[in-house]
Image (cartoon, rainbow, N blue to C red):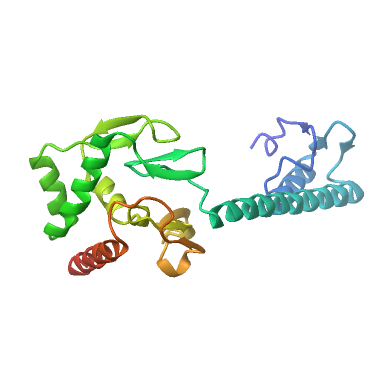
Amino acid sequence: RMIQYQHMPLVFSVDVARFPPNPLDMSMLIHWCAVHGTLIADQQQVYDPACPEDSLVLGIQGVLAVSELHAIRRRLQAGLDEKASRGELHHAVPRGYVVVESMYLRKHPDLRVQQVIQRVLDQFACCPSVSALLRWTWEQNIELPRAASSDGARVDWVSPNYRALMDMLRNPKYAGVYVHPRYQRETRTTSCGKVQKHRRLSDPDEWTSVLHDHHPAYITFAQYQANQQKIGMNAQRHT
């Protein structure tokens, strides 16, 4: 807007090729600066976007910078995928667990934490739904541990809610199974044309890493599968 109203005669950057996040933004910046007579400069040179030669140089620099950024992201993602294939990538510590040496998932050393998690997971077999399990925890005045440190060793005790219970029941780590990725990111366009980023739980066929008996479990994998079936049947009844 400042360029449009000609309130900014010069756009400066330490490296002119680095500040636009994608080629489209770079093209728009060059276009608006050329139309409204604004110069672009970095530590080495001043560019006039209205000049075809300078405009070409800016465009090439922007495309190369974005390509380099994508290559860096691919290398970083490859490193994360390799770590996940060994079961050593932990984005968040599940309730009732701790991460040892930044790699290994183990049950929390506090027996109170273990007993509460075990009791809640076992009780779901007697409950017809997650809502019923939530009511049971309220009736029993049960509090759930929540990780208060990056390794999960320090915990806060909080009141249960539907989302916390659902996350526990749908997390295969409680069955001793390490999976990656647990979530998928999607981009959706609303009816009014607005683009929104959305995160959803991965389907089993979308897991790229599956390691059984990876760490101590609270329930068996058969119990985990039965829980998913019960949750899915309840979801179908309400649709």
Q: Is residue 93 above or below residue 7?
A: below
Left or right of 177? Residue 227 is: left
Q: Is residue 140 above or below residue 198?
A: above
Residue 85 in percent (x, y) is at 55, 57
**Residue 91 appears in the picture as rendered:** no
Residue drawn at 36 percent across, 50 percent down:
216
Residue drawn at 87 percent across, 52 percent down:
56
Left or right of 44? Residue 178 is: left
Residue 54 in percent (x, y) is at 89, 46
Total of numbered circles in the picture?
A: 0
**Residue 233 appears in the picture as rendered:** yes
131 or 86: nearer the viewer: 86
Quadrant placement of the N terminus? top right
114 or 131: nearer the viewer: 114
Quadrant placement of the C terminus? bottom left
What is the quadrant of residue 45 in the picture?
Answer: top right
Residue 136 in percent (x, y) is at 11, 47
Residue 112 in percent (x, y) is at 23, 35
51 or 87: nearer the viewer: 87
Residue at the extreme right of the image, as rendered: 53
Q: Is residue 161 above or below residue 221?
A: above
